[in-house]
Amino acid sequence: MSGGGDLSLATRAVESALEAGASDAEAFLSEAREREVRVHGGEVESLSAATQRGMGVRAWIGHRVGYAFGTDLGEEGIAGLASRAAEAARASDEDEFAGPPKAEGSPPSLQLTDPSIESASPAELAEIALAVERSAMEADPRVTGVEAAVYGGAAERVAITSSAGMAGEFEASSCSAYVQVLAAGEAGVETGLGFQLARGPAGLDPHAIGKEGAARATAMIGAGKPESRSCPVVLDPIVAASFAGLIGGVLGANAVQRGRSPFAGRLGDEVAGEALVLHDDGTDPEGPNSSPFDGEGTPRRRTALIEGGRLRAYLYDSYTARRAKAASTANAGRGSYRTPPGVTASNLIVAPGELSFEQLLAEVGEGVFVTDVVGLHSGVNPVSGVFSVGASGRAIRRGELAEPLREFTIASDLVSMLRAVRAAGSTPRWVPFGGSVSTPPLLIGEMAVGGS
Amino acid sequence: MSGGARPLLDAAVAERVLGKALETGGDFAEVFAERRGGLALSIDESRIESVQSGAEEGAGIRVLSGGTTYFAHVDGLDPADLERAAGEAAAALRGEQTTPRALEAVATESQPIEQRPEEVPVERKAALLRELDERGRGQGGEVAQLSASYAEARRQVAVANSEGLLCGDDRTRVRLAAQAVARRGDSVETGMETLGAHRGFELLEDDPAAVAESAARKALTLLDAVPAPAGSMPVVVGGGFGGVLFHEMTGHGLEADHIQKGASVYVGKLGEQVAQPLLSAYDDGRLPGEWGTDGVDDEGTPTQKTLVVEDGRLAAFLYDRVRADRDGVPSTGNGRRESFRHLPIPRMTNTYIAPGEATPDEIIAGVQKGFYAVSFAGGQVDPATGDFVFGVSEGYLIEGGKVTRPCRGATLVGNCLEVLMAIDAVGNDFEMKTGFCGKGGQKVPVGTGQGHVRVAAMTVGGTQVQ
């Protein structure tokens, strides 16, 4: 990867936008090198290598803002990109809060790379995915196959600069391995997911991933529908993370300011059980989404969102912060150079509690352990927070896990669910669903379960 | 460098890249080059915002050897970068050099575009959104918010492979979407509507603002909604977007990659009765102007109309090249990819249940107590188990053979084998709708369609436990 050259390309784009009539401009350049291996049946199914390199430019003309991106970083390409950004700004309406973010504070120093991300050979990466598959197959005689065992990793380099004084660069790496395991059920096939995240392949434990997938798949054999009722529910970290991601989404100031959040106008209100403590932390050394600064150059920080049962803060980027007369929480996220920055959680951290998983089950007595939900993206009304999603899991009887359950729904609304959180488990894990989330299992006092 | 006149993939360059890709062995090599350009803008709080313009070029290079696919992709179409990517793709191969065949260009019939959207001034697109904003807000004082977006995208693609194929396709899509929020006291409801096609700006000639009116009406209707029932009951699924049900519960299970991995409930069921004889269904990538239509798929295979369910019998699976070779059958033209950054996999195009005999009124009249699902917020299926779930964005109670009150917060849950077999009526009305389908991290435009259908019994997951 090239070094300071990226920053000078970005600077040229900013100058170009100013020449094209912008009063201010910002350029974001990223280069990502990615590798992925998929295996199936002991054979490598595909091996991919990729380089993504491109630039996104935001241009302001007074209080109008526009965005353009492109992959052509030659002289003409950059000039074209910059002038398209200025044109886009001319087409948009005045917004008194639109303007370039001001440079402030200094970014934290973070170690976000693992050399093994680039040094591992294709054969070594294939062996990780193959070992995951083997471990799943050997874990239980009822495992019949693996739908996919995958290793994926990326090293990224980011440079950002603006006419308002922002300038910075960083490198980060991340990888994951996952497996979707198939087990022979009584009536059909059952599936189970195993996964782990790390900065580099050296940080992954293939055996544990395979075992987890096998355990989840075989646990579902013989699943039936629960009776429709209202009862206590324990959410697996995978499920808790998906909900945390949704909550992080509607705590974004953009949703709040536009009245599209069940949390609008509730700052300081009691919105959750005391057991639920939620932070956004873009500086957590283990967080997959950690970085020295956000997508528009503001130094990352840790923000308490829900604490002591009360709503403490929303997530802001520079635009929503100016609109609310607040400070940015450094939550301007970018999917890639193809998308302009927008309010996004960095890493959501649900604080662990005191109870072990067994103690959570004992606390429940009779209820349901939800290990998987489907349809979360479609089954939730983000404005009202009302949701009803498909679920599978295990019955909890006399404080212990009992028979597997499938094809049922859980329904509530986000605020009622948060208020009903009675306890958080003591062992959190990182989950890539709902963004990047670290959460323990959560005990919800009461929830509607729809079955037979 | 981004001059539109330059050919996307020069034959001589492609031949060199294919040769490089097969230097250390392989049975097949392919270059997929792409130039994409697009513009998107939206209106929110009656203000034009999020004006975005994109221009990208790049290529994906793939080498097949035995059962393994080697793939590399690169941003930009510089010949030197393409050759480097070819070397990267082949880096793990250790075999004997193979020689690609000389390329022969094949003409593709791309969809005709009457008015190129990029030639329409951006002011006109902004004016269109203002019209949507006004119409949506005009539906009633309880419409608290209206947002709408316009997007145009052009994808020029070229495929060259070691079997000598060289072809291309030029795809232009235009889409409008509107979202309304209605508020009454503490009650907040949303409504969505979309209009899209594989066509040019001519799509928007005929009252495009109706999209915003429809979104606003849906949100207003839901203000009177009662909590959805929970339990097993007859369900009538509406026409058009209701086709998402078939897309999710059956379509995905017919994609050959799921079949070959044993991860589909339809494994070994070809020729078997999977639905009542009144049901036939197609996947058709050639429907003129439809959202999921292309001239060729992303491997250069012409798209086609495939009968997947014939009078209730399972008739065909959907293939890309790799899976077709494995089964010794021809590709059905379903090898699609989100962009040059992705490998092609079997995907649906426009998938629909063919029109039946019954009128929608007759279908609803046959239900004493049940649920009417008009549109879905989305859905998901596990093809291996057949378990699926749909979030219902617009649903009603059916009481005494009539549609009565709107319901909120309903989900449909079921298993596709059981539910497909339980369809006991198919309507004679028919409509296609647009959507984006996600699979393996790739999003592609798909069309879904059907008339009204009735499922004899299905689980509705609502908050109202009965």
Image: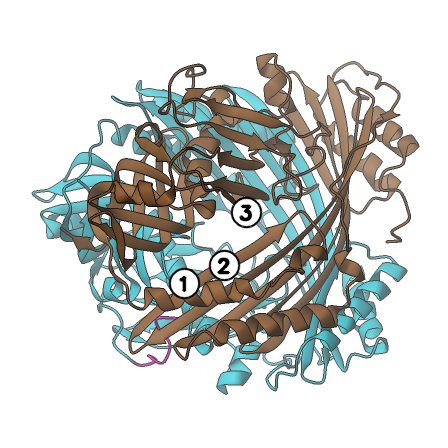
CA distance for labels 3 and 1: 21 Å
- The reply to whether residue A426 is in sight is no
Which residue matches tag 1? B218
Measuring from the top left, give residue B313's x and y in whole percent.
42, 19
* Front residue (pair A407, A18): A407
Q: Chain of mark 1?
A: B
Q: Are marks 2 and 3 on the same chain?
A: yes
Which label was assigned to residue B193?
Answer: 2
Question: Which tint is chain B?
Answer: brown
Tag 3: residue type?
Phe
Instruction: Tell me if label 3 and label 1 are in contact, CB under 8 Å.
Output: no
Q: Quadrant of residue B228?
A: bottom left
Q: Are marks 3 and 1 on the same chain?
A: yes
Q: Residue furthest left?
A: A398
Q: Residue at x 46, y 47 (%)?
A: B241
Measuring from the top left, give residue A51's x and y in whole percent.
71, 45
Chain-order first, disc 3 or disc 1: 1
Q: Residue at x 45, y 29 (%)?
A: B253
Residue A179 colored in magenta in the image: no
Instruction: Tell me if label 1 and label 2 are in contact, CB under 8 Å.
Output: yes
Question: Which tint is chain A?
Answer: cyan
Tag 2: residue type?
Glu
Chain-order first, disc 2 or disc 3: 2
Q: Chain of mark 3?
A: B
* Front residue (pair B423, B22): B423
Which residue matches tag 3? B436
Q: Residue at x 15, y 46 (%)?
A: A228
